[in-house]
Amino acid sequence: MEPVLVKIGGDLIEKDEQLSILAEWIKEQQEENRPVVLVHGAGKQIDSLSNQLGIAITKYNGRRITDDATREILVQVVAGTVNKRLVTLFRGHGLNPVGMTAADGMLTTSKRRPTSIENGQTIDFGLVGDIHQANPKILKILIGEGFVPVVGCVSWSEDHGLLNINADTLASALASALGCETLYLVTGAGGVLNQSHSRIAKLNPQLFNQGSKDGWISEGMIPKLQHGFEALEHNVNEVIICAPSDLALKQGTQLQLTH
């Protein structure tokens, strides 16, 4: 059966109750012979350690600008404390997780993102990568043996070594490479909220553009939705933004390419 891919962000990493719901859902999927790959970010935790160490945090439209010091923090947090926290919790629920990053097993190869002009402003994201190639061989081996890959958002490039990769970017690329049936972008918000703070059941690119223009879609939700739509364009059947408690019923905000 085709695998599903679940991406979680830093807002859920420290919420044991929510992670436990996710872990039990993953167990149910495996019992139904539906393998799961998990991709995680750690934005909140990177910000926290950066503040503790006095390292400046710089973002543009919800995307982190990464210098040498920030990359060191990112690797420590993503590949270390956050990844192993998830492995520990999942093992406690009877799963067989394998912690890794997108740099391991030749899973991804990236190139440093070039400088761009956005709204008349020159933007250099620093040590941030764009995925050049995704090779899901290691994931297929692991899920074929009943393991749950837990993949942190660190990639590799020939010229710059380890690079920061937006976790939504990574999730979209891996879901497409695996030919996943469904990509779940799991958040604390549980979906996309409109101006009245009500969850939208379905979202297409036209409504996304309107929401971005009006400001009720902003910051980190913008790249999340952009990469969600990309996944639909590249071999993924459905993309759903939801909370852990919504997974069983596929509730949340479902992305659509058309009206």
Image: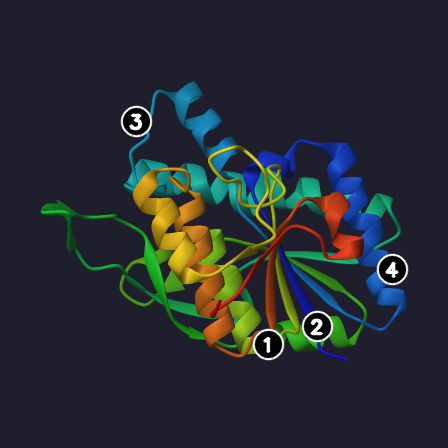
Q: Residue at x 27, y 60 (%)?
A: 112
Q: Is residue 251 above or below residue 88?
A: below
- Label 1: which residue? 178
Q: Residue at x 82, y 64 (%)?
A: 29
Ranked by sequence position, the earlier of labels 1 and 4 is 4
Q: Residues within 10 Å of mark 4 (few under 14, many from 20)?
A: some
> Would residue 169 be found to the left or right of residue 161 on screen?
right
Ranked by sequence position, the earlier of labels 2 and 3 is 2
Mark whose residue sits in front, 4 or 3 = 4
Identify which residue, 238 or 153, lies in the foreground.
Answer: 238
Q: In which quarter of the image is residue 30?
A: bottom right
Ranked by sequence position, the earlier of labels 2 and 1 is 2
Amino acid at pointer 1: Leu
Q: In which quarter of the image is residue 6?
A: bottom right
The reply to whether dot 2 and dot 1 touch (C-beta < 8 Å) is yes
* SS class, disc 3: loop
> Would residue 23 be found to the left or right of residue 185 on screen?
right
- Label 4: which residue? 28
Ranked by sequence position, the earlier of labels 4 and 2 is 2
Marks 4 and 3 sit apart, C-alpha to C-alpha, by: 42 Å
Whole-percent x and y of residue 204?
47, 61
Marks 1 and 4 sit apart, C-alpha to C-alpha, by: 20 Å
- Label 3: which residue? 56
